[in-house]
Amino acid sequence: MIVHFPFLSAILSVTLLGALIIIVLPENKHFLMKVTAGVTGFISLVLSLALFVLYDRSLGGFQFVEQIAWLPRLGITYQVGIDGIGLAMLLLTGIVILTGVLISSHEFKAGGLLGATGRPKEFYALLLVLVAGVFGVFMSLDLFFFFLFYELAVLPMYLLIGIWGTGKKEYSAMKLTLYLLLGSAFILIGILALYFSSGLRTFDWLVLRSVAFPAHFQNIVFPVIFVGFGILAGLWPFHTWSPDGHASAPSAVSMLHAGVLMKLGAFGIIRVALELFPIGAKFWCPILVFLPIVNIVYGALSAMSQKDLKYVIAYSSVSHMGIVLLGICSLNALGLNGAVFQMFSHGVMTALFFALVGCIYGRTHTRILNEMGGLAKLAPFLAVAFTVGGLASLGLPGTSGFVAEFLVFLGAFKAYPALTVIAATGIVITAIYVLRVVQKIFFASLNPNYIPEADACTMKDQFTHEHLEEVSDSGHKGFPISVSDAVLLEKIPIVMLMGILILFGIWPSLIINVINIGVSSIVQTIGGSL
Amino acid sequence: MIDFSLLKIELLLCGLIAILFILDLLFTNKKPLHIVAIAGTFITFAAALFFRDTGTTFVGSFISDDLSIFFKILFLLNAFLVILLSGDFLKKNPLYTGEYFILLLSATLGMVLMASSSELITFYISLELMSISSYILSAYQKSNPRSGEAGLKYLLLGAMASGMLLFGISLLYGAAGTLHYAEIAGVISAHAASPILYLAVVIILAAMSFKIAVVPFHMWVPDVYEGAPTPVVAFFSVGTKIAGFAVLMRLFMTAFVGLKAEWGILMAAISAITIIAGNLLAIPQTNIKRFLGYSSIAQAGYVLIGLAMATVAGLSATMFYLVAYLFSNLAGFAVIIIVSGKIEGDKIDDYKGLWKRSPILAVCLLISFMSLGGVPPLVGFFGKLYLFTSAVENGYVWLVAIGVLMSVVSIYYYLIVLKRVYIDPPLDTSPIRASIWENTALGICVAGTLIFGILPILFFDSVVSSVQTFLK
């Protein structure tokens, strides 16, 4: 290795340090907290980009490996390293955290979605701890630390949704936490089984990968781990936490959760289930593939019938995660490349969606589709951004969504032709609900209650702060509401996310080349076809 | 020949008790007493850290080895932290300040002796020293009927357990003809175990189940926890439990080691039932002390997993978890002592909006509960993981499955409390402040929870090696 700078530990420590600085900042220095969070997100993105550039593509495998013995007696090592798949995920996390922090720093302003709750200190600190956990999972090469970071990424969610959420937030937060902890209970049992049956008494992933576990053991443990991680990936029928959770969470948290955290589940399936249990994977994937198919179709159908904008996006995440899982279950290079690319693409796309939903909700004070209408006239920028996201979601060529879904279906068709046909209907349904949503919010006739911002000044008496408080969660109740277009602080992250969607739609090989390095080594382990 | 050098810790404690006794008689101002108690306990604790003498004395009935020294350090740390936390309570109930410290330290002396006893009568006497001091401490607030009720209940049920223990000991003496652990082990390995011996083992285990508060002998816990003064509850929720485990470990791993297979299964079953019952019963609680009572029952169930395994890994995991439990549980109690000193209430609803009244206390409670629930990177997580590891190693996968699933349940009820702390709006926004002593104790507990969670290696190897020498 040419570069000896410990990039991976640096990313982890930067995020944790950011959280620590925010904790010790005085209570009233809100601006400093936002800046610290923003700078932390920016540094971690820059470091991920640096890794992306410095990763030696000709060498492949795990690079930037760092190793510190942590508890040798139990075979636990702090060991991090990054391969092609992890690299894509690291980049995604960096993008989503930076944009999430920017979006939420706007929402914390008075009158914004988070303005009423306040408490930015805890918000940003928890957000950064969560992100440190996410980064940790993507780079851990030791199952103990993998699990540790995994839990660290899951638990701050409870408070993030419970405190700053909307609607039935406490119920959603608890449901989400319990579901995910149930998943991690499965994972823990799987990891302990691995630890003992290898006979090596080590959590070292690289060592465990070289162990050929007996077939019957693999067949027993594979589904346990698959379901454990599947719960976080939104696998049907364990997905019900996800719509509630995403709909109740504040924008930045939804962005991170749907954008990155659900990917942890899929990533865990690839890293632990697939790579350590190739025989189990071959036995179970043709059986378990029915679940992702249900995910795709059922998620899309549910999204179609939702009345609440945020639930539409949340169910579309369930549907799109089904595509990721379908790609994984196809067990060939095409499908896996597609799955990882879809993880990246959907992460960016859904982050864009939730950011936009936050922007819209902050303006209209309602998320019920039928109560909105004609916003394109008042907020053309938001309309354009939402349409781009929608087109990526339905897989229009030229956006990254197309490339990802195309690869997945190509790979899946090779493995399960008949089932793939059923799954492909999901795309049609996606088109229906996406276009319907875009039409209802932006292009139907303008809701007479929405007035341009310029007019609001003339009717200031009606437009008071108390009025805003009253309408905050429950729709505008016939009051006139001034709607403006996005401000700069919203435009920057939205343009970033949009740009990435289009960039990787036009030039997918930029990242597929890297992903493929990771995927081809997995395909070799499984012995699947290219 | 009696080797007094092995008794340094005990003698220091006796000296401290005597000094406190004299000072209590001489001075009417009780404030210096608190300082002397804090300083004295700390000195004893620090001395115990450097104490390394091993050997046996009193004709083999007193043993000092790595294991017992380890437990003594824990008891002294527990006493030190509780004494730090008692200031506010004693300011409000100043009537018997001197007696309070003396009883607290004599209970600690009982625990310290329990960890070292290797003969049944010595063990019984130390146990009674600890128990009787605890009974009086629970009834300390004479004027408060709840405290009196708690004391009486504890006394009656405790006396019943002591009776059972004596009955078991007498049966054991009848069957084995000796009271020394090592000689009992010799008798068991030489002859086939008689039914009376089995009966004795079961009865002794039942009696000790009362002390460590596991199902079905846990009934006293919620009532006593609710009624007794909070610092006292903190003291015996940790101390008595660790002392019980210290004795169980020595008694069962030396005297009854030949019957390992039999009592192992029994303990595994008890631990499973305890984990399930403790965790489920904690959910509907509305009083924070009852709540922590049930949570501590569940925790004892987890600790019992390691003991049931009766292997090096199992016993080390037990000891590690006890340390984790000490720090995490005392951190929780420290917060409760500070808060209840201010708001005069123990309802969980009283904790609404605590984050606003004191962000630091809220964070400490979060760390404590999450550690008890087994969340990384806190010490409770590693402790649980190590316990589960030792159980899987012995093939008790079903026990681990129960333990893991029930720890999800435990997160649920800890989160219910934390929901009030963090999410619900405060009923009263006046800030809560703690004294410097209370902050010190809280700081030590939280630091222990965090540091030993991130770097368990700091004392992990010494735990394992002390178990290894013990089992040799």
Image (spheres, grey):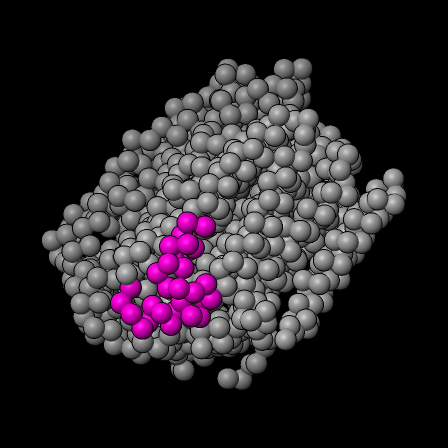
Q: Which residue is rendered at x = 63% and y = 19% of the image?
A: A466
- Between residue B252 and residue A240, name the one nearer to us: B252
Horizontal and vertical percent position of residue A301: 25, 37
- Between A217 and A333, the one nearer to me in the picture: A217
Residue most toward the bottom? A2
* The residue positioned farthest toward the left in the image shown: A418
Q: Percent from the top left, x then y, of residue A333?
A: 26, 68
Seen in the image, is A339 located left or right of residue B120? left
Examine the rendered structure and indicate whether residue A364 appears above or below residue A105: above
Where residue A34 sits in the image (x, y, percent)?
A: 66, 48
User: In the picture provided, is A288 more to the left or to the right than B231?
Assistant: left
In-front residue for pair A266/A529: A266
- What residue do we see at 54% from left, 31% from top? B287
A321 or A212, which lies in front?
A212
Which range of residues does the magenta coloring cover?
B165-193
**B192 drawn magenta:** yes
Q: How many marks?
A: 0
Magenta residue check for A271: no
Which residue is located at x 49 percent, y 22 percent? Answer: A474
The answer to whether any part of residue A408 appears in the image is no
Determine the image quadrant of residue A175: top left
